Image: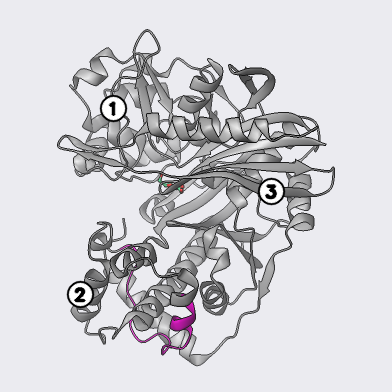
Amino acid sequence: MPIFVAVDLGAETGRVLRGTFDGGRLEVGEVHRFVNRPVALPQGLHWDVLALFADLSAGLTAALADRGGDRVAGVGIDAWGNDFALLDRDGRLVGNPWHYRDRRTESSTRLVARRVDPAVLYRTTGTAPLSINTASQLVAMEGSAQLDVAERLVMLPDLFGYWLSGRLVTEQTIASTSQLLDVGTRRWAAGVIEALGIPGRLFATDVVSPGTRIGSLLTDRRVPLWAVAGHDTASAVAAVPAGAPGFGYISSGTWSLVGLELPEPVLTDEARLAGFSNEAGVDGTVRFLRNGTGLWLLQRCRAAWGALPYSDLVAAAGTAPAFRSLVDPDAPCLVAPDDMPGRLAELCRASAQPVPAGRAELVRCVLDSLACKHRWTLERAEELAGVRAEVVHIVGGGAANPLLCQLTADLTGRPVLAGPVEATAVGNLLVQARAAGELSSLAEIRQVVRASMPPRHFEPRPSDAVEEAYARFRTLVDTGDMI
Ligand code: LFR
């Protein structure tokens, strides 16, 4: 049986997973897991890409050594979006890549807007103006020595692919998080790059679509390296186990990426002002979605409390009073990692709501608020795209949080289908399986996900309490800061 290996890099954790595909079902097993530890230097916050490469290489060695009689039919890499490395003319790394949460980009969106009319930029790239975008980061680096010597820009999954295979490509889905890719042609948007004052020479690599063979591993030439959907969210959406069109999805992890899969982008001013992006999906599909703060709020509370099991926190929240205090998860003061319980309490106090007493009430406040924001975002997406989602799929870590899934069903009024938790790795593995000729379409990929890991159903429970809470939430969001 062919086996495939997925390298899945998240902002908190990296993993190497093995997938065994028998023609109908995929079985996934984790081979190696490692911490992704950003490093704060006096000059700013960076990723330690050398440590990540050492860890993923160790995982790959273990996965390849343990193959038994099976044939390794491929390796694929996906990672979080927006971040990139610069290479010099010898193909060597120029400095350590920056972390998208580094504060050097604080005024970048304003600078970008001064150089290119925001409506024109949105019509060209389809990307919401966020400080984490590659474009914002590059503009903030203007005049730096790094930019002076750089010859190529490479998005992070492609950097690791380059180090594994010696071949440099740009994969389309990860490039679509840059705000520098043309949403129509899916090529670099040369006019935008020039108008922003970013050196054009950085963008000389070919843009390839998911499923393209990059090359083979330098350490074992028999093993192909495939370009998968290199953006983790694109891999997760490919693994949504939908049987028909007309679904909404929430890729729920540190972020909540809430949106729709569309055949064409939505490039209106309304979509731009509501903070929606049109990211590239598999097979020319568009991921029309909004980046919202997700379980980050819970992760940071838990960090402040000493790493209690999530399942205990969620179970306790289930017994706390519902919808007592609500916050906008995207409130700017919640971006910083420190003292999350204190910041949440402060937001409740400032909006004249009861301050949650104790951990259970605070977790309840977070989950109620996330579910409200899920509804707000889904309904905005539907209005903007002019389509209705009959069901909502939750994939990623949040699919293992039954309270969040039930609350999202209650708020959106749609059935929620939860899982797979491992959607990112599953999407990575099955795009490889298709590239290797084992499957033929995105619909078939999703059929395999349904057969291999059937989702869990949550039926909506409409009530006056839900509607009253949502009305309160809307007031908070509609009067707050949107982006
Ligand atoms: C999710 C994700 C989001 C992206 C954010 C930052 O892991 O890739 O899609 O907006 O990370 O890169």
Tell me if mark 1 has few (under 14), some (14-19) or many (20+) residues whose alpha carbon lies within 10 angstroms of its own.
Answer: many
Quadrant placement of the N terminus: top right
Tell me if mark 3 has few (under 14), some (14-19) or many (20+) residues whose alpha carbon lies within 10 angstroms of its own.
Answer: many
- Element at badge 1? loop
Quadrant placement of the C terminus: bottom left
Query: Residue at position x 26%, y 23% from top?
Result: 197
Which segment is the magenta one? 314-330
Which labelled disc corresponds to residue 291?
A: none
Q: Amino acid at mark 1?
A: Leu
What colour scheme has been applied to the protein in the rendered image?
A: one colour
Q: Nearer the viewer, residue 340 or 152?
A: 340
Give the percent coordinates (x, y) of residue 134.
35, 34
Look at mark 3 in the image and give the residue it sits on.
28
Q: Amino acid at mark 3?
A: Val
Q: Residue furthest top?
A: 90
- When asked about the image quadrant of residue 18, the answer is top right
Compute the Cα span from label 2 to label 1.
38 Å
Look at mark 2 in the image and give the residue it sits on.
346
Q: Earlier in the sequence, mark 2 or mark 1?
A: 1
Look at mark 1 in the image and give the residue it sits on.
196
**Magenta span contains residue 294:** no
Q: Amino acid at mark 2?
A: Glu
Give the percent coordinates (x, y) of residue 394.
58, 62
- When asked about the image quadrant of residue 410, the answer is bottom right
- Element at badge 3? strand
- Element at badge 2? helix
The mark lying in front, picked from 3 and 1, is: 3
